[in-house]
Image: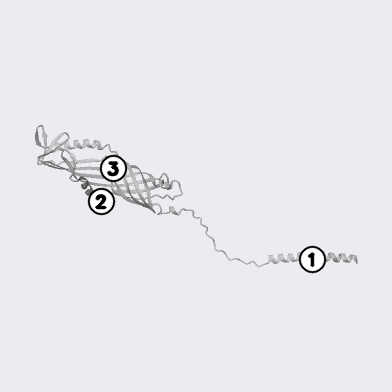
Amino acid sequence: MKKLSVIAILSVLVTPAFATDAELAEEKISTTDAEIVEVADAEPVALNTDTTNPDIKFPHGLQIGVGVSATSGLNGFVGYANKNFDSFWWKRFGVRLDFATTAPINSLIDSGIDAVMGDGMELGDGMMITDGAIDAYHVAALIDFYPFGDTWFLGGWRISGGYYFGNMDISAKLTGEEIGDFSFSLDGKDYQYKGGEMNATAGLDWSYHGPYLGTGFDLGLFAGFKIYFDAGVVFTNRAPSIALDIPPTGLQVREGNAWQDVDVDELESAKNQALAEAQEELNKLTFYPMVKIGFMYRF
């Protein structure tokens, strides 16, 4: 009896253990054979891999300007200078095509000259300038270097270099009037016009070209509007040339104590000698000044 009871006890203890393993196996099979539910494909997510700075795309950096040049008239330029480049060097460089002309304002310039001269500008020997005119232009290709890049305020200062082509033509009317005979000196000789009146013309023509070096700045106002200023010189070996026209009609020259009708060839020789002496002084001018100011807009 005692032996059977022990076996019964062991049977009770072992049976649940086997049952548990069987259940676990069945659960494992059930899990393995479970139906696989397909999930619909999700919409692909686009990753932004474009690291380009949008502020360096055209027309950002495009610039235009309108102003005045002290020696060339109305001034304008088109160019490119973008301070938003990530590159240390690219943000410091710009280019410009610069041009100017007096053509649209010639009448205004002539009126201004007349207003300044009034009744005339004395030259000595009884002569004066009673009328004057200026005609000028230039074209240039420039490279600008901004040492401070996009640094606030200092970023507007630049050093400019390039090449200029231009011309300045100045003409003037010379008159003289006295009671009696009008006299003047030329190349050491005395001349006079019978009748007390003299009319002549003088001119200066400066056709120049050469490398340019200067400085300037772009001073911001609001949005992309700025004030621009340039000052520099064009280095050239082409000096201005001068011309003088003295009408020989009614002109006399002093020979000793007597006045004689002037010989046209002698007059031309005396005039050319005087011009040559003046030209020697003008040949010392090896640079053409350039000063400009105006408004600009940079996109």
Image: 29 above or below 246? below
Tell me, yes or no, whether the two marked residues, 1 and 3, touch with CB atoms within 8 Å: no
Viewer-side residue, 238 vs 200: 200
Image: 165 above or below 299? above
Amino acid beneath label 1: Pro
Amino acid beneath label 2: Ile
Q: Position of residue 160 (x, y in %)?
A: 36, 44
Q: Nearer the viewer, mark 1 or mark 3?
A: 1
Separation of disc 1 and disc 2 at Cα?
115 Å
Tell me, yes or no, whether the two marked residues, 3 and 2, touch with CB atoms within 8 Å: no
Q: Position of residue 4 (x, y in %)?
A: 88, 66
Report the disc number at residue 208: 3
Report the disc number at residue 103: none
Which residue is label 2 attached to?
Answer: 105
Can you say which quadrant of the picture contains the C terminus? bottom left
Instruction: Point out the residue furthest to the right here.
Output: 1
Callout 1 secondary element: helix
Q: Position of residue 5 (x, y in %)?
A: 88, 66
Amino acid beneath label 3: Tyr
Circle 2 packing at 10 Å, graded few (<14), some (14-19), many (20+), is: few
Picture residue at 24% right of the left edge, 50% below the top: 108
Can you say which quadrant of the picture contains the N terminus? bottom right
Report the disc number at residue 16: 1
Q: Nearer the viewer, mark 1 or mark 2?
A: 2
Q: Earlier in the sequence, mark 3 or mark 2?
A: 2
